[in-house]
């Protein structure tokens, strides 16, 4: 495949995931499924199935390799990053800025439990697409750094309907996602071809953010700076791995 073919693959994958997620969102609304059901998060999985069919790859073999359980000490340490990061942001914004406290568990217990339970399979639904198919596909042609940028843009645009509160909010949130996107690449490549590291990182990130971060717009700039800083630190400390060039076969 030529470079432009990989770029087109990214574009078409985004469109497929976006359309599937939109359809699932419509189903969720019509069927009156609570928001914590997270049906749109399974869109990337459906897109992956289409692309595996296009590439004439075995779905069974794909799932077997991607779900081979590979967890080691570096990956376990990586999982602590979002907890420390979100905990630090929460402490900073509450104590120093006096922003609203974290979620009131006493009034949202049932919703919180359902969110935590249903978020795990929903995260798998996303990661089958982003780190299961798209990232390794792009890394066949581009460096991990460039591939991360491409996945981050696609991943961010996929979230647009739920994050477009305002142009400023989206820009800050997009910065936040792009920064931590490099941590995902680092975690995935540590366990390649298994996606369990990305799944667990994604789950811990979402749950810790849900429980610890303030649900206020004012905290978004702080989160954006912190997430971007962590992502850049991971890249700089592991630049040799992020700049490694793939072996081109054509």
Image (cartoon, rainbow, N blue to C red):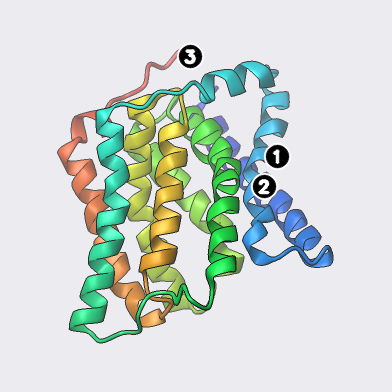
Q: CA distance from mark 1 to mark 3?
A: 29 Å
Q: Residue at x 57, y 31 (%)?
A: 5
Q: Mark 3: which secondary structure? A: loop
Res. 240 image quadrant: top left
Is residue 40 visible in the rendered image? The answer is yes
Q: Residue at x 49, y 36 (%)?
A: 131
Choose mark 1 or mark 3, whichever is in front.
1
User: Which residue position holds label 2?
Assistant: 43
Query: Depth check: 139 or 1 in front?
Result: 139
Query: Depth check: 237 or 88 in front?
Result: 88
Where is 157 relative to 74, above or below? below
Q: Residue at x 26, y 68 (%)?
A: 89
User: Which comes sooner in the sequence, label 3 or label 2?
Assistant: 2
Where is 183 relative to 97, above or below? above
Q: CA distance from mark 3 to mark 2?
A: 32 Å
Residues marked 1 and 2 touching at CB (< 8 Å): yes
User: Which comes sooner in the sequence, label 1 or label 3?
Assistant: 1
Is residue 228 visible in the rendered image? The answer is no
User: Which residue position holds label 3?
Assistant: 250
Q: Is residue 116 left or right of residue 98?
A: right
| Res 137 label | none
Res. 61 image quadrant: top right
| Res 46 label | 1
Q: CA distance from mark 1 to mark 2?
A: 5 Å
Query: Depth check: 148 or 132 in front?
Result: 132
> How many numbered discs sit on the rendered protein?
3
Q: Is residue 27 left or right of residue 160?
A: right
């Amino acid at each position: 495949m030529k470079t432009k073919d990989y770029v087109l693959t990214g574009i078409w994958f985004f469109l497929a995931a976006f359309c599937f997620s939109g359809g699932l969102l419509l189903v969720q609304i019509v069927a009156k499924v609570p928001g914590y059901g997270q049906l749109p998060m399974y869109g990337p999985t459906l897109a992956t199935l289409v692309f595996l069919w296009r590439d004439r790859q075995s779905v069974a073999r794909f799932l077997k390799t991607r779900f081979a359980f590979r967890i080691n000490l570096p990956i376990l340490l990586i999982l602590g990053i979002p907890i420390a990061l979100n905990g630090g942001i929460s402490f900073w914004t509450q104590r120093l800025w006096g922003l609203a406290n974290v979620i009131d568990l006493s009034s949202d217990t049932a919703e919180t439990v359902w969110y935590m339970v249903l978020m795990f399979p929903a995260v798998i639904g996303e990661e089958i697409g982003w780190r299961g198919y798209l990232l390794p596909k792009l890394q066949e042609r581009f460096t991990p750094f460039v591939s991360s940028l491409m996945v981050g843009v696609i991943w961010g645009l996929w979230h647009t309907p739920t994050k477009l509160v305002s142009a400023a909010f989206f820009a800050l949130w997009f910065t936040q996602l792009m920064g931590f996107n490099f941590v995902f690449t680092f975690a995935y490549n540590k366990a390649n071809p298994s996606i369990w590291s990305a799944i667990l990182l994604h789950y811990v990130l979402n749950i810790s953010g849900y429980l610890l971060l303030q649900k206020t717009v004012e905290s978004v700039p702080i989160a954006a700076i912190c997430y971007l800083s962590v992502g850049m630190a991971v890249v700089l400390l592991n630049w040799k791995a992020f700049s490694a060039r793939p072996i081109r076969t054509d």
